[in-house]
Image: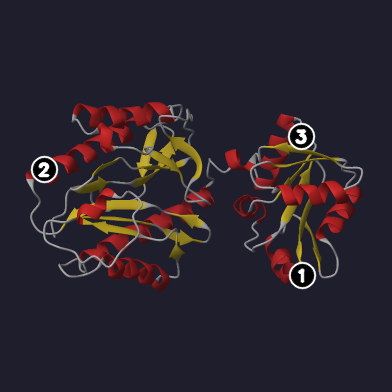
Amino acid sequence: MSHLDQMRSALAASGTPAFIVTDLANLRWLTGFTGSFGQAVVSATAAVFISDSRYTLQAEEQARDFAVRTFANPVDGADVLLEELRAACIDRLAFDKANVTMGALQRWEAKLTGVTLSAADDPIGRLRAVKDADEVALIRRACRLADQCMERLLGRIRAGVTEKELAWEIEVFFHSQGAGMAFPAIVVSGERSARPHGAPSDKQLQAGDFITFDFGASVEGYYSDITRTVVLGSPSERQREIYAEVLKAQMAALSAIAPGASGKAVDGIARASLERAGLAQHFGHGLGHGLGALVHDAGRLSPTIDWTLETGQVMTVEPGVYIEGLGGVRIEDDVLVTTDGCEVLTRFPKELLCL
């Protein structure tokens, strides 16, 4: 079933006669369009893509399942939208309550005469959670690049190198492979590794440092997200203990991932493992998130969100322990939920590396 057909089925199931998609990630999933501005109106019989004249040729190439309409100054896009709604006999239109601004809504209310507007959840957010074969193939490619990048970094980790220099190595590698960055790389070392999302600094690596790398590749709009923690030189017994417990928590969570499993329960398994080691108080974030057309895509492994896993979802599994004054460890893999469990897509080794 095409993404457009999936969207129409979701609208029919919810009793929504027509929906306007404005979120760029959802637009790309639905239409294939990769530009910076567009709107897609979908009903049971209509599929219209609207953008401005910057994207006329691009929209015609990419949004092939849609009737494409573009406009140029001094035409107002809201007037074009009204024309298309009238042509499609649409007088009730739902919009994404999480994406449409108050200013945009006020303009629509003033311009779209005869159209009843209603705020709703964009169903694509949920539809994106389960990946088709093409999407999984792109995520696999992004994961392979992440593994290769981590391997490349091993030869560049030494005393005196700065966190920023290693972050630059990551960016250069991905661009050399024709890929992009999924997000700005996290490289933190020593006591700074206790910052889960710390930005790379001018700090130089020193013997005994934990060094945490968190990065991902972008391949044709789909992402990977890997985290590994290594030690420069010989680790202390405390460092070995913490690393072993984080790895144990991750492996326990991985063994619990399967269709029908509760994301809250999977998170709880990792959290309970760290609790037994006296470390759960140092694990403050959720265990994982969906991965796909967004780095944080639909789906959560979290103590606060009860998400049921489905075959075809791609999730991160990333327990961490962060102790102020000592440092932190996080181990993150990307996994595909399969019919009987999960497949780990990021393959870089997880034993503690002492460099």
| Residue at 29% from the left image edge and 70% from the top image edge | 165
Q: Amino acid at mark 1?
A: Ser
Marks 3 and 2, how far apart at CA: 57 Å
x, y percent for residue 233: 10, 59
x, y percent for residue 193: 25, 52
Name the disc covering residue 53, or none. 1
SS for tag 1? helix
Marks 2 and 1, how far apart at CA: 60 Å
- Residue 347 seen: no
Viewer-nearest residue: 185 or 335: 185
Residue 36 image-quadrant placement:
bottom right
| Residues packed near mark 2 inside 10 Å, few (<14), some (14 to 19) or many (20 plus) | few
Q: Which residue is mark 3?
A: 16
Left/right of residue 341 with respect to residue 15 in the rendered view: left
Q: Which residue is mark 2?
A: 238
Nearest to N terminus: mark 3 or mark 2: 3
Residue 118 versus residue 350 in the image, above or below: above
- Residue 20 seen: yes
Residue 71 image-quadrant placement:
bottom right
Left/right of residue 302 with respect to residue 350 in the rendered view: right
x, y percent for residue 325: 19, 48
Q: Amino acid at mark 3?
A: Thr
- Do the numbered discs 2 and 1 sit on residues whose CB atoms are within 8 Å? no
